[in-house]
Amino acid sequence: MNEQLKQVIDNSRRIAFLGGAGLSTESGIPDFRSADGIYKAQTAYGHSPEVLLSHDFFWQHTDVFYDYYRKFLLYPEARPNKAHRALAKLEKEGKLTAVITQNIDGLHQAAGSQNVLELHGSVHRNYCTKCRKFYPMEYIQQSEGVPTCSCGGIIKPDVVLYGEGLETKTLISAVTHIQRADTLIVGGTSLVVYPAAGLIDYFSGKELVLINLSRTDRDSDATLCVHEKIGEALSFLLEEDQ
């Protein structure tokens, strides 16, 4: 157990959490740039993920977009890991005010977290671009080719594609929680993807904790750096119940 991390959490009253793909890798979901991640598509599809997952590509090559999307972004078998469960416990105890995530897999909610701010949307929400009717992830999985609504409109995942802006309401809420926090824990992210990475600049509280396997460019700004898997780093929170 990291005693210093435990002490920080014990002494905190308002914690905000900002997380990235490192949380989901422990649930078997590849991160964006790993050898097993969605960058494999460059050889399979002849385009980079930034192109395949762009707003323009969605509308110009919707069939190819969905072929790629189903193969590389949907992981219905994934389950919450120790990090997700530990954060849900902190929220239940009244210490954690919000989970701010760059992930689109819905695992924080599956673990029991209530106040989850999804910066990049969710694969579990899909909507008709014509009538705005919503469809679950299962509908996308079970459909073939381009999924369409009962009204005939094209269905689009409620995820932020390249070339699209983040939802203003979600971004403002994330900034507010970070500004009000006495402790900000940043986990499972290399802090290179903006604007999400820039949210750390709104924090002016006491303890900035960075938990990531590799070093980040913001390590020098932190009061505590933990270079290990976030599930392992936070597992002591679950052990307290045993």
Image (cartoon, grey):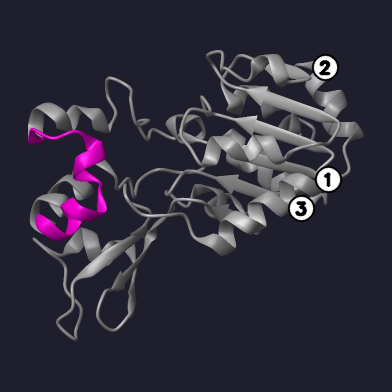
Q: Is residue 116 visible?
A: no
User: Which residue is depicted at the point 33% across and 22% down?
Assistant: 34
- In the picture of the structure, the residue carrying the numbered disc 1 is 14
Task: State the image coordinates of residue 173 (x, y, percent, origin top left).
Answer: 66, 58
For the C terminus, the image quarter is top right
- In the picture of the structure, the residue carrying the numbered disc 3 is 92
Circle 3: is it few (<14), some (14-19), or many (20+) Cα within 10 Å? Answer: some
Indicate whether 152 appears above or below 137: below
Task: State the image coordinates of residue 230 (x, y, percent, origin top left).
Answer: 60, 26
User: Which residue is depicted at the point 42% across and 48% down?
Assistant: 105
Label 1 residue SS: loop
Label 3, label 2: how far apart the Cα atoms are: 22 Å
Indicate whether 59 appears above or below 151: above
> What numbered label is drawn on residue 147?
none
Q: Which residues are magenta?
A: 45-61
Magenta stretch, main secondary structure, is helix
Pointer 1 or 3: first along the chain: 1
What's the residue type where badge 2 is placed?
Glu
Indicate whether 158 appears above or below 50: below
